[in-house]
Image (cartoon, coloured by chain):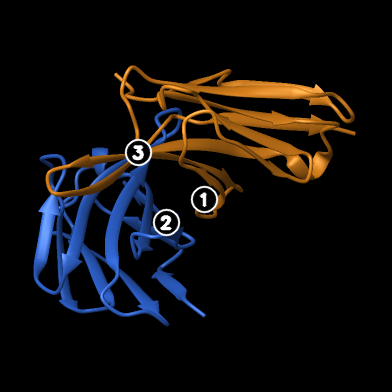
Amino acid sequence: SQTIHQWPATLVQPVGSPLSLECTVEGTSNPNLYWYRQAAGRGLQLLFYSVGIGQISSEVPQNLSASRPQDRQFILSSKKLLLSDSGFYLCAWSNGRRGYTFGSGTRLTVV
Amino acid sequence: TQLLEQSPQFLSIQEGENLTVYCNSSSVFSSLQWYRQEPGEGPVLLVTVVTGGEVKKLKRLTFQFGDARKDSSLHITAAQPGDTGLYLCAGVMFSGGYNKLIFGAGTRLAVHP
């Protein structure tokens, strides 16, 4: 069966510090991978998606970047965090035939 | 502005009551999905509706896709405290060469015993 792992679950980081959130998928190959951010009252906002290794598309301009070094690994990064980067970050995968499967999320607080 | 508008934003009801949550858009979607999210967790897929006018039932939950594939509703019969959570609708739209999943802001449901 397919599983998705996302870590860490919570993170408190000072303004200006770097960020690295990791997401891995098991039990499937060549998945479509996504990073979403969820803010209260605004639903989920798509940040990045990837259809293959090294292929990253950005949905909105921001202080974040994403990379896919391996087929089932998706990383969300920042060189210098801003206060506005605080939020609940969710990784998801799909194979195009079913709905998305989400990780358990990372609550990021930038202080 | 949200591409998908969900209403109501908040709903607080007593156990046993019925409720309906709406998801509306001016855009056409190839399919629409409903998710339920618990605090501190990722959303979990409940159902996907594909055909205009389609109705799907999941125990006490009934999902309907509008004839024009622009809107959807979720009806819960005899709500129970275990139904408490954030309900999200999400439309699948083909854009930029791939299928995007666009989320509404969600309806937060609280069912009190």
Name the residue rendered at 12%, 53% in the picture: A57
Which secondary structure, mark 2?
loop
Camera sees residue B6: yes
Using the image, name the chain to which the residue with label 3 belongs.
Answer: B
Q: Amino acid at mark 3?
A: Ser
Q: Is residue B56 left or right of residue A17?
A: right
The quadrant of the rendering that contains the C terminus of chain B is top right
Q: Which chain is orange?
A: B
Which secondary structure, mark 3?
loop
Q: Position of residue B101 (x, y in %)?
A: 33, 43
Q: Which residue is mark 1?
A: B43
Q: Which residue is mark 2?
A: A100
- Closer to the chain start, of discs 1 and 3, is 3
Which secondary structure, mark 1?
loop
Camera sees residue A79: no
Q: Amino acid at mark 2?
A: Tyr
Label 2–label 1 contact, CB within 8 A? yes
Above or below residue B74? Residue A38 is below
Q: Position of residue B68 (x, y in %)?
A: 41, 22
Name the residue rendered at 34%, 75% in the picture: A24
Q: Colour of chain A?
A: blue
Asked if badge 2 and badge 3 are on a common chain, one would say no
Q: Which residue is mark 3?
A: B30
State which mark lies toward you, 2 or 3.
3
**Few, some or many residues within 10 Å of mark 2 (<14, 14–19, 20+):** many
